[in-house]
C-alpha cells in the first residue's frame, strides 16, 4: 500500500460522485457571501435609530456586526479550502485514469500489477535457444508490462498529489480554529476572526477602478466597512463601485459636517437643500440614499429607492441650468414620477431612480454650445454607471438590476461623451429626451441594448442637432416613445403627457420593442 | 448612552423573522456540507477519501457554529421583544390600577 491508496483502489475511485460532492461544497461556499450581505443589510436596519435606539439596540447591532465579521472569515477559509478540493478533484481524476489504464495495459499482456504498481508474474527473458517468434512475443509482453508499471507509478504519484491537496484543504479551517473534532465554538472563532477593532482600518485602494473597488469592499468584514466609513467618509462617499448604503452613510456624515461648518453661501444652500429633501424622504418612511455629495464641486446624486436591491434602476441625467441648490427638488420629483410609472408598468417591481447631478451643468443655453460640461460629465457618468454595476456584481446578494439611463436635453450630450469614454456603457437601455444631439453616434453606437428617443414639434431643441445626430433624425435608429405635438422641452416627465408611462415601461423592461 | 430609548416592535419582529430564516438557511448548508463529506469518502476509497471527509466535516462544523450563533442572537432578540411587550403591558396595568381614569379615557388591554 502507498500513502495515497493502492493502485487498485485508485482505479476504483468514483469520479462522478467525487465531483458532485465537491461541487456541492463549492455551492455552499458561493452562497456564504450573499448570505453575509443579507445579514449585513439586516444589521444596518436593526442599527437605525428608527428601528431600535438605546443601549440594547446598539449591542444587538454590534452582535450582528460580529457575526458578519466571523462569517466573512469563515467564508474566506472555505474559499481557500475549496481551491485545494478542486486541486484534489483534478489529481484524483488523473490518478484514476492512469491507474485504470495501467491495469488494463498490464492485463492485455497477461501480467498483473501489485498495489505498488510492480508487475507480478513477469515472464523471464527468452533463452538463447528460444524460437524467434516466441522470443518476440515474450519481449513484447515484458515491454508492455514495464510500460504499465511506469504508468502505475504516475498514477500513484497523482494519488499522492490528491492526498496532499486533501491535507492542504484542512489548513485554512484549522488556522481559524476549526479542528474537525468536536463542536466548533463560535466564541473561539470570534477571538480569531473578530478581534476588537484597533481604530486603524485598512487602507483604501488606489487606482483599482469601480470593479476593483467593489471587490475590495466586498472582502472587508462588516466591522472594517463601518470603520472605513467612520475614518474616511470623504473617500468612501466618492469611491465608485461601493454599495449605495456605504455611499449613503459616508455622505450623510459629510452632510452633517457641512451643515455644521459651512458659512452662508452657495455650498451651504446646496447642503441645506439636500438635507431638506432627505429629511422629507426619511420622515415619510421612504428609502433615499445620498450616493454623492460634494458641496465644493456642487455635485450631488440622490436615489429614491435602494440601489443595492432594486431590480430596476433609472438614472436621470438632467440638462442645462440645473443646480443642486435650485433644482434638486424638481429632479427628485421627476425621479419619483419615473419610479411610479415603472411600478405601474410592473406592479411589485423594486425600483430605484437616481437624481444624478454628478456633473456641473451649463448655466444656460449661451454656454451650452461649449462642450466642456459634457466632456467632464460624460466620464463621470460612465464611472457612476460602472460603479453601480460593479457593486451589485460584487455583493452577489441579488441579481444585477436592469439599468436605464434617462438623459434629458444636454444630459443626452453628456451620455454621448459617456459612450465615448473607455469601456462599454454599463446600461441596458438609454432614453434620449429633447436631445440637442450627441457625439456618441447613432443608436447602434450607444453601447446599450435598447435605445429610445422622445422628441416633439413643440420642442425645438429636440430637433436642433447642435452636438450631433439625435432621435429627430429618422435614420438615427432608436425606438420612438410617444409624445404630443404640443409637448414642450421640459414636459417629458409630466404625468399628463404620454411619454412618462412609456418611460416607466422602459425602466421596468416591459416596453414592447425593447 | 443614548438619551432616547425607542423600539419599533413590529419592525424588530420582522427583522427577527428574517434573522431566524438566515440561521435556518445556514443550518441547512451545514447539513449539506456534512452529507457531502461522507460522499467524498465513499467516492474516494482509502486515505484520500478519509482526509476529504474530515475536511467536509470541518466545513460543516464551521457552518454549524455560525448557524448556532445566528439562532442564539435571534433568540435573544426574541426575548427582548417579548420583554418590551410585557413591560409595556405591565406599565399600562399599573397605571390603570393607580387610580380611576376620567370617563372616556379607558383603554382596552389585551
Image (cartoon, helix red, strand yellow):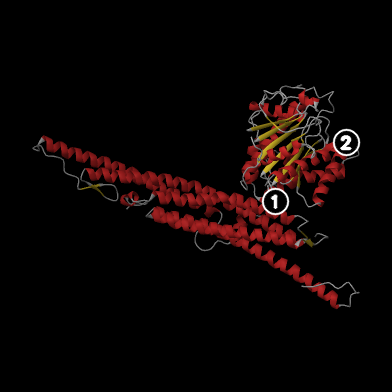
Q: Which SS class for mark 1? A: loop
If the image is split into quadrants, where does the C terminus of chain A sit?
top right
Residue A17 in view (yes/no) = yes
Q: Quadrant of residue A486?
A: top right
Tell me if mark 1 has few (under 14), some (14-19) or many (20+) residues whose alpha carbon lies within 10 angstroms of its own. Answer: few
* Residue A178 appears in the figure: no
Kindly indicate whether the residues beneath marks 1 and 2 are on one polypeptide chain: yes
Q: Secondary structure at mark 2?
A: helix
* Circle number at residue A198: 1
- The Cα–Cα distance between marks 1 and 2, rounded to whole angstroms, is 39 Å
Q: Chain of mark 1?
A: A
Judging from the image, mark 2 belongs to the subunit labelled: A
Looking at the picture, tell me which residue is in the foreground, A502 or B109.
A502
Q: Is residue A499 found left or right of B105 in the rendered image?
A: left
x, y (%) of residue A430?
A: 69, 33
Residue at (71% x, 60% y) in the render: A60
How packed mark 2 is, by other alpha carbons closer than 10 Å (few <14, some 14-19, many 20 or more), is: some
Nearer to the camera, B53 or A407: A407
Position of A499 compared to A390: left or right?
Answer: right
- Residue A348 lies left or right of residue B68; in this view the side is right
- Please provide percent x and percent y for residue A138: 16, 40
* Residue at screen point 82% across, 52% down: A283
- Residue shown at 70% from the left, 62% from the top: B13
* Total numbered circles: 2
Q: Which residue is mark 2?
A: A266
Which mark is nearer the camera, 1 or 2? Answer: 2
In the image, is residue A162 above or below residue A514? below
Q: Position of residue A396 (x, y in %)?
A: 61, 46
Question: Horizontal and vertical percent for residue A44?
Answer: 71, 53
- Pick whichever of labels 1 and 2 is earlier in the sequence: 1
Asked where in the image residue A297 lies, by quadrant, the reply is top right
Amino acid at each position: 500500500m502507498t500513502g495515497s491508496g493502492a493502485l487498485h483502489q485508485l482505479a476504483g475511485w468514483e469520479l462522478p460522485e467525487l465531483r458532485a460532492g465537491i461541487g456541492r461544497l463549492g455551492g455552499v461556499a458561493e452562497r456564504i457571501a450573499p448570505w453575509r450581505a443579507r445579514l449585513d443589510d439586516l444589521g444596518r436596519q436593526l442599527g437605525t435609530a428608527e428601528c431600535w435606539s438605546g443601549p440594547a439596540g446598539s449591542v444587538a447591532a454590534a452582535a450582528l456586526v460580529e457575526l458578519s465579521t466571523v462569517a466573512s472569515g469563515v467564508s474566506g477559509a472555505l474559499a481557500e479550502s475549496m481551491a485545494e478540493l478542486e486541486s484534489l478533484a483534478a489529481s484524483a481524476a488523473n490518478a484514476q485514469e492512469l491507474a485504470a489504464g495501467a491495469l488494463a495495459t498490464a492485463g492485455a499482456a497477461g501480467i498483473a500489477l501489485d498495489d505498488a504498481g510492480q508487475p507480478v508474474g513477469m515472464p523471464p527473458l527468452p533463452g538463447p535457444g528460444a524460437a524467434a517468434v516466441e522470443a518476440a512475443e515474450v519481449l513484447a509482453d515484458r515491454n508492455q508490462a514495464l510500460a504499465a508499471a511506469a504508468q502505475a507509478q504516475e498514477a500513484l504519484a497523482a494519488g499522492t498529489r490528491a492526498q496532499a491537496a486533501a491535507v492542504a484543504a484542512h489548513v485554512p479551517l484549522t488556522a481559524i480554529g476549526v479542528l474537525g473534532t468536536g463542536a466548533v465554538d463560535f466564541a473561539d472563532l470570534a477571538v480569531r476572526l473578530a478581534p476588537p477593532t484597533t481604530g486603524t482600518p485598512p487602507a483604501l485602494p488606489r487606482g483599482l477602478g469601480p470593479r476593483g473597488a467593489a471587490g475590495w469592499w466586498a472582502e472587508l468584514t462588516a466591522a472594517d466597512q463601518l470603520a472605513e466609513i467612520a475614518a474616511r467618509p470623504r473617500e468612501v462617499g466618492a469611491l465608485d463601485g461601493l454599495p449605495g448604503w456605504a455611499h449613503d452613510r459616508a455622505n450623510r456624515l459629510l452632510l452633517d459636517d457641512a451643515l455644521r461648518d459651512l458659512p452662508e453661501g452657495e455650498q451651504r444652500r446646496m447642503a441645506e437643500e439636500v438635507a431638506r429633501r432627505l429629511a422629507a424622504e426619511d420622515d415619510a418612511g421612504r428609502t433615499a440614499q445620498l450616493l454623492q455629495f460634494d458641496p465644493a464641486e456642487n455635485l450631488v446624486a440622490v436615489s429614491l429607492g435602494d440601489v443595492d436591491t432594486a431590480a430596476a434602476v433609472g438614472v436621470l441625467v438632467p440638462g442645462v441650468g440645473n443646480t443642486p441648490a435650485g433644482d434638486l427638488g424638481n429632479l427628485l420629483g421627476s425621479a419619483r414620477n419615473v419610479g411610479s410609472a415603472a411600478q405601474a408598468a410592473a406592479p411589485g417591481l423594486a425600483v430605484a431612480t437616481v437624481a444624478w447631478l454628478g456633473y456641473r451643468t451649463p448655466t444656460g443655453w449661451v454656454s451650452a454650445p461649449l462642450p466642456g460640461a459634457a466632456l467632464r460629465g460624460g466620464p463621470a457618468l460612465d464611472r457612476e454607471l460602472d460603479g453601480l454595476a460593479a457593486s451589485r456584481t460584487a455583493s452577489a446578494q441579488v441579481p444585477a438590476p436592469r439599468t436605464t439611463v434617462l438623459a434629458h436635453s444636454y444630459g443626452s450630450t453628456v451620455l454621448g461623451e459617456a459612450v465615448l469614454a473607455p469601456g462599454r456603457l454599463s446600461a441596458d437601455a438609454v432614453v434620449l429626451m429633447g436631445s440637442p444631439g450627441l457625439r456618441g453616434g447613432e443608436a447602434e453606437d450607444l453601447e446599450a441594448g435598447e435605445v429610445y428617443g422622445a422628441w416633439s414639434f413643440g420642442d425645438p431643441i429636440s430637433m436642433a442637432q447642435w452636438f450631433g445626430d439625435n432621435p429627430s433624425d429618422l435614420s438615427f435608429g432608436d425606438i420612438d416613445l410617444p409624445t404630443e405635438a404640443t409637448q414642450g422641452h421640459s414636459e417629458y416627465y409630466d404625468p399628463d403627457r404620454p411619454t412618462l408611462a412609456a418611460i416607466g415601461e422602459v425602466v421596468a423592461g416591459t416596453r414592447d420593442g425593447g | 448612552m443614548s438619551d432616547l430609548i425607542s423600539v419599533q416592535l413590529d419592525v424588530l419582529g420582522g427583522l427577527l423573522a428574517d434573522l431566524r430564516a438566515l440561521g435556518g438557511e445556514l443550518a441547512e448548508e451545514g447539513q449539506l456540507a456534512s452529507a457531502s463529506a461522507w460522499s467524498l469518502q465513499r467516492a474516494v476509497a482509502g486515505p484520500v477519501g478519509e482526509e476529504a471527509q474530515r475536511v467536509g466535516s470541518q466545513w460543516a462544523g464551521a457552518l454549524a457554529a455560525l448557524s448556532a450563533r445566528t439562532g442564539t442572537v435571534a433568540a435573544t432578540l426574541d426575548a427582548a421583544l417579548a420583554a418590551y411587550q410585557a413591560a409595556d403591558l405591565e406599565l399600562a396595568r399599573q397605571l390603570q390600577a393607580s387610580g380611576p381614569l376620567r370617563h372616556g379615557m379607558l383603554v382596552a388591554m389585551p
